[in-house]
Structures are given as C-alpha cells and as structure tokens.
Image (spheres, helix red, strand yellow):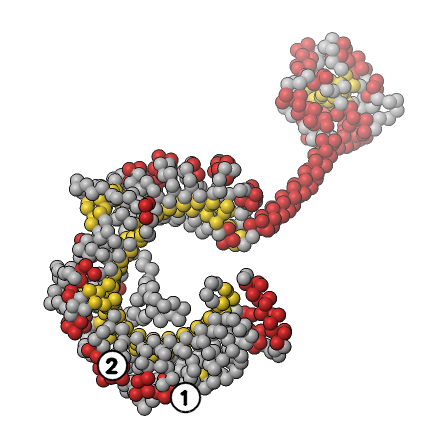
C-alpha cells in the first residue's frame, strides 16, 4: 500500500466516523506514514506537538512521538482502541500519565518514556496505569529533572502490574534502594540503571532483583556516582555486564572483581570510563597487567569493551590467553592513552575468531583530564531488539584504517602467503570489521611491498588522513577487495603497480591526495585503465579544474565524482567525450561543491548540462557564481538556465542598442563633417596618398584680384606664363565667373575647386574694402583654409601701409613672390613649382 492510498483510507475513515473537526484532530496528517510487512508506522517525531495528535487508524502498530513538546498523556489521548504495540514518547516534556491513558492500547509491549520529566512517584505514574497492559520493555531513564529530593518515593504499587516485563531501564531512586514493589517483575531479564547521584550504589540496592534470573545488567554513573566493586555478586548468571562512567573505582578493581565469573561464558563485558576520580583529580594512567586480567582470560566472552579507561600500557599476554583469546569476537580499546598503537595490530592474530576490532584515540584522550560521558547508544532503542553499538562513535578527522567484509561465498579466493615480504600484516581470518584511528600516526611511508594474511573476506578498506606517502609498490592479499579509499595520503610517481594489486575493485576513492595527484590525473588510462570492474570513482577535493582526460574510458565506469574541486565548467572536449560515452551506457557525474560559473560566457555549458544524457548527481544542490560575483543555488537547472539566458540576452540587446545609437550619432556626425569638408578630404588624399590633384580639382590655381585693379597683367602676362606656356588651368574671375559683381560664394567655390589660390596684392587691393571682405568671408567659411594653399603676388608699395588681418594670416615665408622681379624667368619657374607642390 502506498503512502498516498493509506492517507486516503485514513481520510475516508475519519469522515465515516464523523469526528469533530478540531485542530487536534488533523494533527496526525503532519505525521509520516509507512507500511512494511509487519507494521504500520506513524512517524510523528519532531513535529512540535504539545498534545497527542488524534485520528490514528486502528491498524497502526507503531507510533513515534519522540522529540515533541507533549506535557502529559491524558485519559482521552487515545480515545479508541488501537493495535499499537510500540509507543515512543522519548524526549518530550511529560510530567505525568493519567491512570487510564493507556487502556485503549491493549497490545502495547514497548513503551519509551526516556528524556522526560517523570519523577516516578504516584502522582506521575498512578496506580493501575499498567494494569492489563502486556508491557515487555519499559524505558524510564534519563529523566530531565534538575533536583531530586531525598524523601522522594517511587510509585512501587504501579510496578506491581508489570509481571510480563522483560526489560526495564530506570533512574535509580534517591535512597538508592528498589523496594518490594519491584518484586513482582518475575520475568525481568534486562536491567539498566542510570545512577547520577554523589553517593554509593551497592548490592543492597538490588536485593529485590536477586530472585530473578537477570541476564543483562547495565549501570551508567554519569561520572558522579560510586559503584561498589562487588555490585555484580548478586547476579551470578549474567550474560551482559556493562558498568560505565564511575567514580572512585578504576578498571583494575572491576577486572579483579570478575572472580565470581571465573571460567564462565558471557556475551559481553563493557567496562567503560571506569577511572579513579576524586573531585576534579583523576588517575593519570593505567597499566593493564596479567594480574588484572587473570580472571577475565579464564572466561569465554564474545564481546569486550574497555573504552575510555586511560590505559597506557598493555602488558604482553594480558589479553591473549585461551579460552579468552579463542572466544573473543569483538574487541574495543578506544579512547585510552595507549602509546604503542601499532603493536595492537600484532596482537590481533592471536584472536582466532575475532570478527570486529575497534580502536580510535584522539589528542584529547591523551590529556590528563577528560570528563567525557559515554552514554548508552541505541542499546535501549524502542525500535530494535539488539544492540548495534555499545557507545556512540565520533567521526575522527585523524588517521583511519578501517576494514569491513561481507560473505560472498564462491567469490572469495584464497590468497597466496609468500614469506618474502618487506611488510607482513597478520589478521584473524574471521575478521570482518576493523576500525583503527590512532592519535600518534603509527603508519610509515610505503616504500616496500605489503603482504596481508587473513584478509580473504575483506570487501572494503578505508585508509584516510594518515599523511602516508606510497611509492609504486605492490600490495598482496587484497585480491577480493571491492571498495578502496586511500584519501588524505600521497604518492611518489605513478602508482600503477599499486593499483594493479586490487583487480576486483568496484569503488575507488582518491580524495584529497596530498602529493602526486597530478601524475594520476594526467595518466589516468595507464594508472586506472586496467580496472575491468571499477564502477564508482571518487576524486573529491583535489583542486581539479576539469575531469581528468579519458577518465570516462575506464571500461565499466558509471560514476565520476569530482565534487568539492575547483571546476567552473567542463571543457568542450570533456563534454564531447562524455556525450559519446552516454550514447552507449549510463554515466553519472557529481559536481556538487564546485562553484560553477553561470555567467553569460557559460550559458553553453549550462545548456549542455540540461540537454545532455549525462546524469548529474545531487544537481539540486549545485552552486554557481554569476557575473556580479553572487553565489546562486541551482535548485532547478532548467529554470535557472532560462533566467540566466534572459538576463544575458537582455543585457546584450541593451548594449547592442546603446552601441547602435552611438553608431548612428557618429555616422550622422561623420556625414555632416564629410559634407562640410569634402575639399579638405580631397586635399588630404592627394597629399598623403600621392594622387594626381588635377584629377580631383577643376582648376590648378584660382587668381584673386581686385576688380578695380589693372586686369591686363593678370589676363595677359600671368595667363600666358602659367596657362599657355606651362599648361596650368587658371580660374580668372573676369573670364570664368558670371558677368557682374561676383559674390563671396563664388570666391569660396573657386578656392575649393582649385588646388592653389593666387592673391594679386596691390595698392588698389588694399584700398578695395569689398575685395578684402570677400576674401575674409571665403577664408572663414572655408574648410580649414591654411596659408600653404595660398600664394601672394605683391608689390613693394603694399608693405608701406597696414595690411588687412586676413593677409597677415595668410602670409608665409614660402608663399609670397614680389611683382617687381617677375622679369626673371626663374621666378616664374619657382611660382610654377609652388603651385604644383603638395606642401
């Protein structure tokens, strides 16, 4: 049944029954519903409920109301009968339960009330609360009560009805003594006590439980309470013993007190953080000697946890005597002060049936005072029957060597056991889980071949953050390995031989390679190309700017993980190669954590990522930086692309419009300028391009004189010498202008249509004001008329009088010729040359 159909069924069921439409009624819709082969689960955790929601279907079997703000369970909290067998109220604000609050849960067998404010008195747990309730597991520990009064008495009559109870977790009474009211728990097998009081917990507190056959006894003293060393004397048949976070008693006393269990068989012994604390002072370190373990090694124990006991030295033989070494399957020595960390590896071979070894030490573990409290982790989870871990693991950032295995039957191949080794590492053949995280870095650089013995079942090896540099050496004994992570280390040279040591690898992680990664990335085919089964390749945090070339050519590659690198976009060549591969098989790329470029220059890449057959992992979490430097989260790549496209196109057209507008203005201005300076442009082209000016100008020279002057010299002598004898084209106003008084426009036109202009300057010219005015007007209206375009023929008498300003402006050393000297033939040649010159 799908979740949607289940919700529809609930809604129809509510309408048929006609419940009142209160707000509380529809709170259950906020829950997440799931159905499996055994249960119908209503997950209502962390929904900020202040009351138990209403409207659960009758066939719901598991209700999780943990981590809300519910203060009480009232009589009508469950107003009709339900099939619920498991109810979790963990971590609320419960202060009490009404007497009949559970009567409509007749199948309830597991109840979790941990982390509330219930003080276990008759006011919070009234008599008859558990009557006719078949509870087998009741968790009442870890109550969030600031102060417990010494005269507080537990509601023992309430517990009289729990004659089917098999497991009880409870905070100890303030006495601390459990009264006769607990004497009816005849089926009790598992007892867990949280004892957070600054006094002593001894055997007298548990006399009422001595007549029961307890198999599991666990105490958490919160680093406050003192637990007597002989506390276990009253329970001679325990299968699980767990004492942690105690004061005034060290590990040595705990181990010696196992004399009552000499030669016994047990599933688990956990002595965690048993240190001699006296106020703020603490036992500095501890030596685990053969004398301390003399009773432990006689026992057949499957699991041993000696965590956080400040062990500095383990005496040789302290933990490797049979039958202990032959029975041990799980060993945890984490969070001590062990200096010879690597020696722990040498001892593992003696545990012939060891399946799991856990060891991690941090720098804080080596300090003189560490007040960390190891709480029970999942051992009281209401949703499972077995313990997954005895204490919560913390993710270390230091060196980790981890091994896990799976049974693959015929896939497991025997390994060769050559004795010609440089490094030889022996492990029990049943080892399937190893977690080794040392604080003192016992691993040395790999300069020689390494041989593993007893590693046939290993399927995964993690060797990270150890700062080890590996040469191109061989590793033997890991032929069956399926997954390998060697991140946070480095390589000398191309590790081709090293990689060929793992022929069956399917998952390979080379994240944060500290040295030599460029040699791998540049030669990916030679280093990794031999892998025939590799499907997932992780190359995180290696400062890549693109996919390594030809990485997609690895035979069976399915995932290329280059997250958290420096990739802005995939190159065109990479995209083409990925597209070619995607046509033949499914291939995925993970670019999460790279700040991609989503500026206008990267639109092609964004468009490709939308249309490509390549599958991008976690694409909803990608980030990119736009042209303004802003970081954008690409929640939907297609929508993001359209927004970027519109932004880029609108900006382009804005720039295009502005440029076009300026080009039009510039073209208009240039056209006007050209129109006004046509003659200037013609002169410039003649002068600088070497063109023939006679092809571009109507006249070679314009002769300007006063109309009152004697025209005979101009019309005869000047004309004969220049036009007749030297083939120049002259423009003479009396001959070439319209009859009558000529105007300024005519003078200006003649100047512009002539290559040079001769001014016939005489006394009469100076006296003719109209003549000077026409010349001045033409020059000022002309196109940048300069003196080099004018030649002045003057008589000596003109310099005896003030000259007009226009004449002074046009006079130059090279453009004036005296009329009195024109009897010389050479002067006419000079004048001719001046007219033809382009200066």
Q: Quadrant of residue 367?
A: bottom left
User: What residue occupies the far bottom of the structure in this picture?
Assistant: 151
- Residue at the limit of the structure toward the left, as seen here: 291
Q: Nearer the viewer, residue 529 or 491?
A: 529
Residue 306: where, in percent of width, then height? 22, 66
Q: Which residue occupies the foreground of this view, 761 or 486?
A: 486
Q: Secondary structure at mark 2?
A: loop
From the image, tell me which residue sits under label 1: 127
Characterize the local packing of mark 1: few (<14), some (14-19) or many (20 or more) Cα atoms within 10 angstroms: many
**Helix or strand or loop: what does disc 1 sit on?**
loop
Q: Quadrant of residue 110?
A: bottom left
Badge 1 or badge 2: first in the primary sequence: 1
Find residue 741 and report its horizontal and vertical position in percent.
Answer: 86, 26
Q: Position of residue 354 (x, y in %)?
A: 23, 57
Vertical position of residue 411 compared to residue 33: above or below: above
Residue 381 coordinates in the image, percent (x, y) = 38, 70
Is residue 114 shown to the viewer in this render?
Answer: no
**Which residue, given by chain and number where applicable, does mark 2 sit on?**
210
Q: CA distance from mark 1 to mark 2?
A: 25 Å
Residue under the image location 27 percent in, 84 percent down: 208
Looking at the image, is mark 1 or mark 2 nearer the viewer?
2
Name the residue rendered at 16%, 62% in the picture.
323
- Residue 676 visible from this viewpoint: yes
Tell me if residue 799 comes above or below residue 538 in the rendering: above
Nearest the camera: 59 or 579? Answer: 59
Q: Residue at x 63, y 45 (%)?
A: 649
């Amino acid at each position: 049944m799908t979740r949607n159909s289940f919700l529809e069924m609930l809604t129809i069921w509510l309408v048929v029954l006609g419940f009142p439409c209160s707000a509380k009624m529809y709170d259950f819709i906020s829950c997440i519903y799931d159905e499996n082969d055994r249960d119908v689960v209503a997950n209502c955790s962390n929904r900020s409920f202040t009351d138990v929601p209403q409207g659960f279907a009758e066939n719901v079997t598991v209700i999780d109301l943990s981590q809300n703000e519910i203060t009480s369970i009232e009589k009508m909290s469950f107003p009709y009968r339900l099939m619920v067998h498991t109810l979790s109220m963990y971590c609320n604000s419960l202060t009490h339960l009404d007497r009949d609050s559970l009567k409509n849960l007749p199948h309830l067998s597991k109840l979790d009330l941990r982390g509330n404010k219930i003080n276990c008195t008759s006011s919070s747990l009234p008599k008859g609360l558990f009557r006719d309730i078949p509870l087998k597991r009741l968790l009442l520990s870890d109550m969030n009560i600031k102060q417990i009064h010494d005269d507080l008495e537990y509601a023992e009559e309430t517990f009289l009805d729990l004659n089917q109870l098999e497991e009880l977790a409870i905070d100890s009474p303030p006495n601390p003594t459990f009264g006769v009211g607990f004497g009816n728990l005849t089926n009790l097998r598992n007892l867990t006590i949280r004892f957070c009081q600054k006094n002593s917990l001894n055997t007298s507190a548990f006399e009422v439980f001595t007549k029961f056959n307890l198999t599991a006894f666990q105490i958490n003293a919160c680093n406050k309470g003192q637990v007597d060393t002989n506390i276990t004397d009253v329970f001679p048949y325990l299968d699980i013993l767990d004492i942690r976070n105690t004061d005034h008693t060290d590990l040595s006393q705990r181990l010696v007190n196992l004399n009552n269990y000499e030669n016994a068989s047990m599933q688990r012994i956990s002595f965690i953080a048993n240190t001699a604390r006296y106020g703020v002072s603490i036992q500095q370190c501890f030596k685990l000697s053969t004398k301390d373990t003399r009773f432990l090694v006689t026992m057949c124990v499957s699991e041993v946890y000696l965590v956080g006991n400040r062990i500095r030295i383990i005496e040789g033989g302290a933990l490797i005597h049979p039958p202990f070494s032959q029975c041990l399957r799980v060993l945890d020595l984490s969070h001590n002060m062990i200096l010879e960390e690597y020696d722990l590896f040498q001892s593992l071979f003696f545990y012939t049936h060891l399946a799991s070894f856990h060891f991690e030490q941090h720098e804080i573990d080596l300090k003189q005072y560490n007040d960390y409290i190891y709480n029970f982790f999942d051992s009281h989870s209401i949703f499972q029957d077995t313990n997954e871990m005895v204490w919560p693991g913390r993710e270390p950032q230091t060196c980790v060597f981890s091994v896990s295995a799976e049974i693959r039957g015929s896939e497991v191949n025997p390994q060769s056991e050559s004795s010609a080794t440089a490094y030889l590492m022996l492990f029990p053949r049943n080892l399937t889980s190893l977690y080794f995280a040392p604080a003192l870095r016992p691993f040395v650089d790999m300069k020689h071949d390494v041989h593993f013995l007893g590693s046939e079942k290993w399927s995964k090896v993690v060797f990270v953050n150890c700062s080890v540099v590996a040469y191109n050496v061989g590793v033997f004994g890991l032929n069956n390995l399926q997954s390998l992570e060697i991140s946070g280390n480095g390589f000398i040279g191309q590790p081709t031989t090293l990689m060929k040591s793992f022929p069956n690898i399917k998952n390979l992680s080379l994240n944060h390679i500290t040295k030599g990664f460029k040699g791998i990335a540049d030669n990916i085919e030679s280093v990794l190309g031999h892998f025939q089964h590799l499907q997932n390749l992780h190359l995180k945090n290696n400062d890549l700017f693109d996919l390594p070339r030809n990485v997609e050519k690895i035979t069976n590659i399915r995932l290329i993980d280059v997250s958290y690198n420096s990739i802005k976009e995939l190159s065109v060549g990479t995209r083409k190669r990925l597209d070619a591969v995607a046509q033949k098989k499914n291939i995925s790329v993970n670019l999460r954590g790279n700040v991609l470029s989503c500026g206008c220059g990267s639109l092609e890449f964004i468009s490709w990522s939308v249309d490509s057959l390549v599958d991008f992992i976690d694409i909803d979490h990608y980030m990119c930086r736009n042209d303004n430097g802003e970081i954008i989260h690409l929640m939907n790549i297609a929508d993001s692309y359209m927004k970027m496209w519109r932004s880029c196109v609108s900006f382009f057209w804005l720039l295009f419009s502005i440029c076009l507008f300026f080009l039009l203005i510039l073209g208009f201005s240039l056209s006007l300028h050209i129109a006004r300076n046509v003659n200037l442009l013609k002169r410039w082209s003649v002068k600088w391009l070497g063109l023939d000016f006679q092809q571009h100008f109507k006249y070679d020279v314009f002769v300007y004189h006063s109309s009152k002057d004697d025209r005979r010299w101009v019309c005869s002598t000047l004309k004969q010498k220049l036009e007749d004898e030297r083939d120049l084209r002259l423009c003479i106003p009396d001959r070439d202008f319209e009859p009558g008084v000529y105007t300024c426009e005519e003078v200006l036109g003649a100047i512009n249509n002539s290559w040079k202009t001769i001014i016939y300057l005489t006394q009469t010219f100076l006296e003719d004001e109209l003549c000077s005015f026409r010349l001045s007007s033409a020059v000022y209206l002309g196109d940048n008329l300069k003196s080099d375009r004018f030649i002045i023929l003057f008589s000596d008498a003109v310099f005896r009088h003030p000259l007009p300003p226009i004449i002074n402006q046009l006079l130059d050393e090279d453009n004036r010729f005296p009329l009195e000297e024109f009897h010389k033939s050479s002067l006419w040649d000079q004048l001719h040359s001046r007219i033809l010159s382009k200066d």
